[in-house]
Amino acid sequence: MSLLLAAGLVSASSASAQTQKEEHEEQKVTLRAIMSHLGAEYLRLTNALLIDDFKALQESAKAIEGHPLPDEIIAAIKDKLGKSFHGFERVDEESHRAAADLARRAAAKDIVGAAKAFGSLAQGCVSCHKQFRATLRPLSD
């Protein structure tokens, strides 16, 4: 009986350690995770824009504007892009400004302005992907 109890405790301990390891790995922010989150928010923005859901528009725009970009990811991007990093920063900043503009227009319930800001945001995303995605893809794998 005590052998079964000991085996059960070891098994439970191993399961707990595995769960803690998985939770730690989930907390690690990767470029792929950031891009996946931004993609989900972009889809949410699209839907919110189509149905005039100003609250969701504002929330998603703010989430895009303030998304995390840890120092280690910035350093890896900078290392990978070299002299092109300044172009990346410029396009990234333009996208953040467009998201902030979209959040302001959503708060004002300005659907036409929100649509224009959404277009600027989309242009920023496409521009960044066109210029940098191929080079940065290895950082996402």
Image (tube, helix red, strand yellow):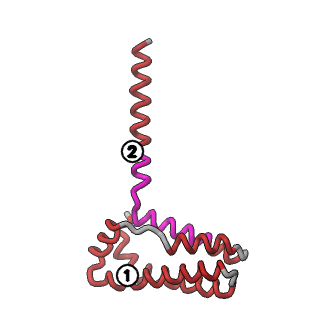
Quarter of image, res 68: bottom left
x, y percentage for residue 11?
A: 42, 28
* Amino acid on which the number 2 mark rests in the picture: Lys
Spot occupied by residue 86 in the image (x, y as percentages of width and height): 33, 84
Q: Is residue 39 magenta?
A: yes
* Residues shaded magenta: 21-44
Q: Is residue 46 visible?
A: yes
- The percent position of residue 71, horizontal first and vertical second, equals 33, 68
Q: Which mark is residue 21?
A: 2
Q: Secondary structure at mark 1?
A: helix
Please tell me which residue is depicted at 70% across the width and 73% down the height of the picture. 53
Q: Is residue 70 magenta?
A: no
Quadrant location of residue 133? bottom left
Quarter holding residue 105: bottom right
- Give the numbered dot on residue 111: none
Residue 80 falls left or right of residue 19: left
For the question of whether residue 122 can be seen, the reply is: no
Q: Amino acid at mark 1?
A: Phe
Residue farthest to the right, as pictured: 51
- Residue 114 pos. (x, y %): 64, 83
Residue sitting at 64 percent across and 87 percent down? Answer: 113
Q: Residue 88, labelled with which disc?
A: 1
Q: Secondary structure at mark 2?
A: helix
User: What residue is drawn where x is 37% and y is 70%?
Assistant: 137
C-alpha separation, residue under disc 1 versus residue under disc 2: 34 Å
In front of the other: 70 or 79: 70
Name the quarter where the N terminus is drawn: top left
